[in-house]
Amino acid sequence: MTSAEFRERLGARVSRAGGQVSTQDLEALESYFRLLARWNTKVNLTGLPLDPPRDETFDRLFVEPIVAADHLLPATDVMPFAPVWFDLGSGGGSPAIPLKIVRPEWPLTMVEARERKATFLREAARTLRLSNTDIANVRFDDLLQSMGQADLVTVRAVKVDAELGAVSTSLLRESGRLALFGVAEISLRGFDLVQTVELHSLSTLTVLSRVPRGTKQVDGNR
């Protein structure tokens, strides 16, 4: 697939889902895809078809994070500063890297326990020149003593359970957001539902808000 074909196809998939992407971002997204495809022959980063990529590949790797970007946080007039953001179980880099490309001002820490995948993430951050981007090669348990420094935590392909809730609670400031990609409906102790968003015909984003200590939780999210 040529660069022109890749960018035209990706742009069309994003538009079809109601999103927008700039020419500059398309170039960076293609660079990420080429790097992912090259590394995936040696390290199992994704099971999605890459050679050639199918519509589901474009949608899952790129369309979902691009469309989600406008739904993760309060409007800029409510949150005028750059949010501190953690992505848990970053694996092959999506949704974190495409989202970082379209929101470069958001400081990002990608958390990945497996060394080879963490090495790929470091290479991707270096190759794409992603500013304010760190890779933490640690287990979730190592984050339990964090002191509520994040405004946003994103998750995909991670089991939504009490451990994830505890880690997210430790990471997030009060009223910080937890964004679950590919999860339609969920209740998690310590979090209230903000919204669910259809990213495209086959995928949903659920956004939760951490309940401040001492605040009664909304019924149905116990």
Image: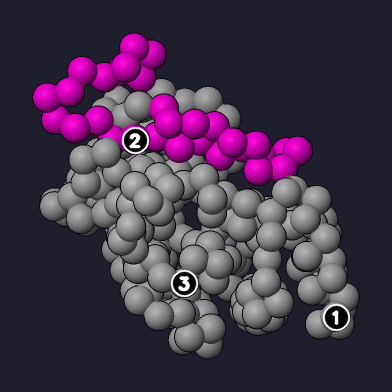
| Residue named by callout 2 | 209
Give neighbour class at mark 3: few <14, some 14-19, many 20+ (Cα, 10 Å): some
Q: In which quadrant of the rendered image does the C terminus lie?
A: top left
Q: Label 3 amino acid? A: Pro
Q: Secondary structure at mark 3?
A: loop
Location of residue 161 in the rendering, given as x and y in whole percent from the top left corner: 37, 33
Location of residue 27 in the rendering, given as x and y in whole percent from the top left corner: 68, 80
Q: Is residue 163 visible?
A: no
Q: Nearer the viewer, residue 167 or 216?
A: 216
Q: Is residue 18 left or right of residue 188?
A: right
Q: Secondary structure at mark 2?
A: strand
Q: Label 1 amino acid? A: Ala
Q: Which mark is residue 13?
A: none
Quadrant in the picture for residue 33: bottom right
Q: Is residue 205 visible?
A: yes
Q: In which quadrant of the rendered image does the N terminus lie?
A: bottom right
Q: Earlier in the sequence, mark 3 or mark 2?
A: 3
Q: Is residue 30 above or below residue 99?
A: below
Q: Which residues are magenta?
A: 193-222
Q: Is residue 195 magenta?
A: yes
Q: Nearer the viewer, residue 134 or 120?
A: 134
Q: CA distance from mark 3 to mark 2?
A: 23 Å
Quadrant in the picture for residue 211: top left
Q: Is residue 28 magenta?
A: no
Q: Is residue 172 left or right of residue 17?
A: left
